[in-house]
């Protein structure tokens, strides 16, 4: 398996994987995947990744800003999606590890993730990568007419943005 930069030409496959995640009802509040232009504009230009094996895209990961305010310039939200038929093979872990390295190379000091509590595999994936739960955003939004909670995860870099701190 190779982790490579996500290119516009990957979008149809990436979008299909995203739609598989949407269909589970436990991956996102989104109900459909956007067009490439909207997705491209909402994600940071770096740390856009695909996992591929034998020419087949098996998963993707990317970052988007949490705020336009300058104080949050080093904070980004993580998205990781793996094709249903490829889950359980370590693809999410591989994508997230490279995403973390690339985020730190681009001066991102904090990564966040909002995860439905029912998405146990995503919870485990993020915990394994050093994320911890900050809290629960109770009934933060409705999906299919049902109020849903979201676990708010965070991972603070140990190499970026720590100058002057004693550890």
Image (cartoon, rainbow, N blue to C red):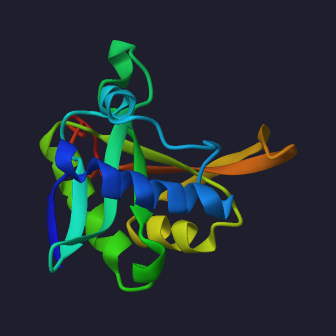
Above/below status of 108 relative to 12: above
Q: Residue 80 appears at what percent x and percent y?
A: 41, 58
Above/below status of 124 relative to 132: below
When asked about the image quadrant of residue 97, the answer is bottom left
Q: Which residue shows up at 33% across the image and 42% down it?
A: 63
Tally of marks: 0
| 90 or 109: nearer the viewer | 90
When asked about the image quadrant of residue 67, the answer is top left
| 128 or 86: nearer the viewer | 86
Q: Residue 100 appears at what percent x and percent y?
A: 26, 55
When asked about the image quadrant of residue 51, the answer is bottom left
Q: Which residue shows up at 43% across the image and 57% down it?
A: 16
Residue 68 visible: yes
Residue 61 visible: no
Q: Which residue shows up at 17% across the image and 50% down it?
A: 102
| 95 or 24: nearer the viewer | 24
Q: Residue 46 appears at what percent x and percent y?
A: 18, 40
Quarter of the figure with the N terminus: bottom left
| 58 or 12: nearer the viewer | 12
Q: Residue 73 appears at what percent x and percent y?
A: 30, 24
Tell whether 20 sits left or right of 11: right
Outermost residue toward the top?
Answer: 69
């Amino acid at each position: 398996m190779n982790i490579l930069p996500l290119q516009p030409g990957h979008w149809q496959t990436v979008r299909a994987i995203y739609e598989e995640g949407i269909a589970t009802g436990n991956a996102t509040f989104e109900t459909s995947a956007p067009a490439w232009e909207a997705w491209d504009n909402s994600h940071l230009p770096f740390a856009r990744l695909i996992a591929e094996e034998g020419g087949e895209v098996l998963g993707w990961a990317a970052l988007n800003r949490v705020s336009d305010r300058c104080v949050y310039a080093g904070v980004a939200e993580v998205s990781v999606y793996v094709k249903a038929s490829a889950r359980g093979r370590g693809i999410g872990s591989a994508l997230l590890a490279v995403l973390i390295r690339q985020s730190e190379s681009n001066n991102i000091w904090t990564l966040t993730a909002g995860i439905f509590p029912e998405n146990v595999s995503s919870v485990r994936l993020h915990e394994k990568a050093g994320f911890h739960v900050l809290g629960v955003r109770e009934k933060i939004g409705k999906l299919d007419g049902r109020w849903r909670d979201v676990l708010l995860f965070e991972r603070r870099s140990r190499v970026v943005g720590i100058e002057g701190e004693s550890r």
